[in-house]
Structures are given as structure tokens and as C-alpha cells.
Amino acid sequence: MPGRCLGLVWLLGALTLTVPARAELRIGDLEVYLNDHEVTVALAVLGTVAPGYHEGIESGIPAFIRFTIELWQYNRMWRDRLLVSKVVERHLTYNVVTKEYRITFLKGETRPMYSTRDLRDAQRVLSEARSVKLMPASSLEPDDVIYVRVRAESALNGENTFVARMAGTAEQTFLQSDFRTIRRIQ
């Protein structure tokens, strides 16, 4: 029995020592706009391309970033109700011959492919999602209390599992906005 406990302590210690240091993926800016026409979300994520990804990306492994944006209706005496969910997915590749980063917009957006030679510029385009339209504001009641939940995931080769997160090739984070209503409170 003491041998098993010692082995378990050694294994846990080895796991904590082998996890690489990396930049943490986090949502730095989340804005929810309620205008007369639509509920719109704008967000910016920091650390989309972690330092552990650089070697993989420059050797030809693509990196993916996925934003799952959900609009929820708050119910005080019951569980909250999901009104709409939208997925925005992007793909980053590196061309070794031309030394160019290419961002492809896969889901949720209809933008042309973006190419640049600067990694910082590629990270900026990869991490910002502006003007994501969720639903018409007219379909909500003026007194409904709503909020937005965002889950951001980044991974090399699109594989975001527990093992990939422990190896440092995938990350994810969550954020929830403040509660809002359509009706303005004076």
C-alpha cells in the first residue's frame, strides 16, 4: 500500500513537471450590443497562437480557433433557456515556400481568405470576431433578461481533447456577459 501511494505521488509530480509553460488563452473583450434591429456580439481573444504552437505551425500543422457564441434567456425559477447558438471557426496555415501565413474562415463568416507574412498580424485577424449577429432584437420580449456565453477553443490540427490540452497543443476558455434587457432602465 505505501508503495502504491509513493508511485502515485511520483506520477503526479512527473505530470506537473512535464507540462510545458505556455500563454493562457483568455477572452479579453466581450461586448454585447442591443440595438433596434439585432443582438450583436464582438469579442477579442488573447493567446490564440500559444508559443508551443509555433514549431507545429511552421512545420505545416494547421491551427484552428473556434468561438461558440450562445444567447441565453435567464429564468429565475427554472433553468435558463438557450435561444440561439452560433459557431465561428477559423483555420491558420503556414506556407514554408512563400513564408506566408494564411487564415481561412471556415464557419460562421463569409470573408475571403487572408494572407500575411507577419505572425502578429495573423494572430490579430485570428483572434477578433466583430459584428457576429445572433438574432433579431424584435423577436425578444422587452422585459426578457438575456446574456451571452462564449467558449473559445484553439488547437493544433483541430484536436481539442484532454490529452491535447495536457500536452500543450490545445486550450479552451469560457466567459459569460452581464445580464441585459431590451428595455432601457433609466
Image: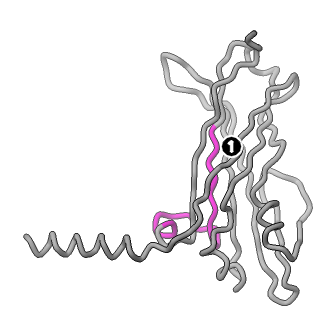
Expressed as whole percent of the image width and height from the top left, the position of residue 150 reads 64, 44
- Looking at the rendered structure, the number of numbered marks drawn on it comes to 1
Expressed as whole percent of the image width and height from the top left, the position of residue 153 reads 62, 57
Q: What's the residue type where badge 1 is placed?
A: Ile
Name the quarter where the N terminus is drawn: bottom left
SS at mark 1? strand
Residue annotated with mark 1: 69
Name the quarter where the C terminus is drawn: top right
- Which residue range is magenta in the image? 149-165
Q: Residue furthest right?
A: 112
Q: Residue at x 71, y 41 (%)?
A: 30
169 in relation to 179, above or below: below
105 in relation to 78, above or below: below
> Which image quadrant for residue 159?
bottom right
Expressed as whole percent of the image width and height from the top left, the position of residue 110 reads 88, 54
Q: Residues within 10 Å of mark 1 (few under 14, many from 20)?
A: many
Does residue 160 belong to the magenta stretch?
Answer: yes
> Which image quadrant for residue 60?
bottom right
98 in relation to 167, above or below: below
Q: Residue at x 33, y 76 (%)?
A: 14
Between 106 and 94, which is closer to the camera in this rendering?
94
Does residue 162 belong to the magenta stretch?
Answer: yes
How does the figure colour the protein chain or chains? one colour
Q: Residue furthest left?
A: 1
Expressed as whole percent of the image width and height from the top left, the position of residue 128 reads 78, 53
Between 54 and 1, which is closer to the camera in this rendering?
54
Q: Residue at x 66, y 61 (%)?
A: 47
Left or right, 1 with reference to 111? left
